[in-house]
Every structure is written in C-alpha cells, then in structure tokens.
Image: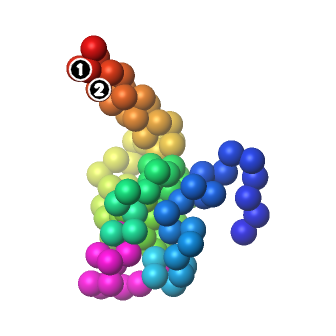
Amino acid sequence: MEFVKGDWRIGASCRSEDPEQLFVRGAEQRKAKIICLGCPVRTECLAEALDNRIEFGVWGGMTERERRALLRRRPDIDSWQELLDTARREHADLEECQVS
C-alpha cells in the first residue's frame, strides 16, 4: 500500500495491528471494532469504505453488514466523505458555541 502526503491511513490506530484482525467474521468483529473506538481517523476510514463500496472487513468502526445497511438506507448520498466532513465541522462549531 502506497501512502501519499496527507494520507489519513498514516494516523490510523490499526496501522500497528495485524490486518487480519480487521477481516474477521461473527463475534470476532466486535473485537475488531474496539480498535476503531478512539481512532483519530475513524471518519475518514468509514468514508473510504462507504464511498468505495468496500465489502469486507471492519472500517471506521462498522462491519460490512452495518455498512451495507447504511448504504441501503441512504442511497441518495454521492460522497460520504463530504457528508461526514460537513457533519464533523458542524459538530465542532456547535461544541465551540456551547463552550463560549
């Protein structure tokens, strides 16, 4: 896998983990999702999987089944990256207003 400057994968919590841990079935997926909990690039990872319709593995804290269900519920989304970036900015703005 080749990384480019600004590549979100460099900051991924799973980068130092065995990749096979993220491509498991059944109850093992819950363990894989734990790796994602505090990941600083969880949103970028999830957007990558959704935008590219990645079918296997845990990405951004979601299993393939969870991602398929989300894609079925929201077929109108053209860019998950754009949607999630906007949501993150709005959430940050809201938190900033509440602190002020």
Q: Nearer the viewer, residue 92 or 23?
A: 92
Q: Is residue 39 left or right of residue 1?
A: left
The reply, left or right, for residue 46 in relation to residue 61 is right
Which amino acid type is marked by label 1?
Gln
Q: In this figure, what is the number of numbered marks? A: 2
Residue range corresponding to the magenta coloring: 23-33
Q: Position of residue 55 (x, y in %)?
A: 48, 71
Q: Position of residue 52 (x, y in %)?
A: 56, 58
Q: Does 72 sit left or right of 39 as displayed?
A: left
Instruction: Determine whether, in the image, residue 94 is placed left or right of residue 17.
Output: left
Q: Look at the picture and state if 86 lies above or below 12.
A: above
Q: Residue at x 40, y 68 (%)?
A: 35
Which quarter of the figure is the N terminus placed in? bottom right
Residue 86 drawn at (x, y percent): 43, 31
Residue 29 part of the magenta segment? yes
Q: Estimate the spatial distance between the alpha carbons at disc 2 and disc 1, rounded to whole Å.
A: 5 Å
Residue 20 appears in the figure:
yes
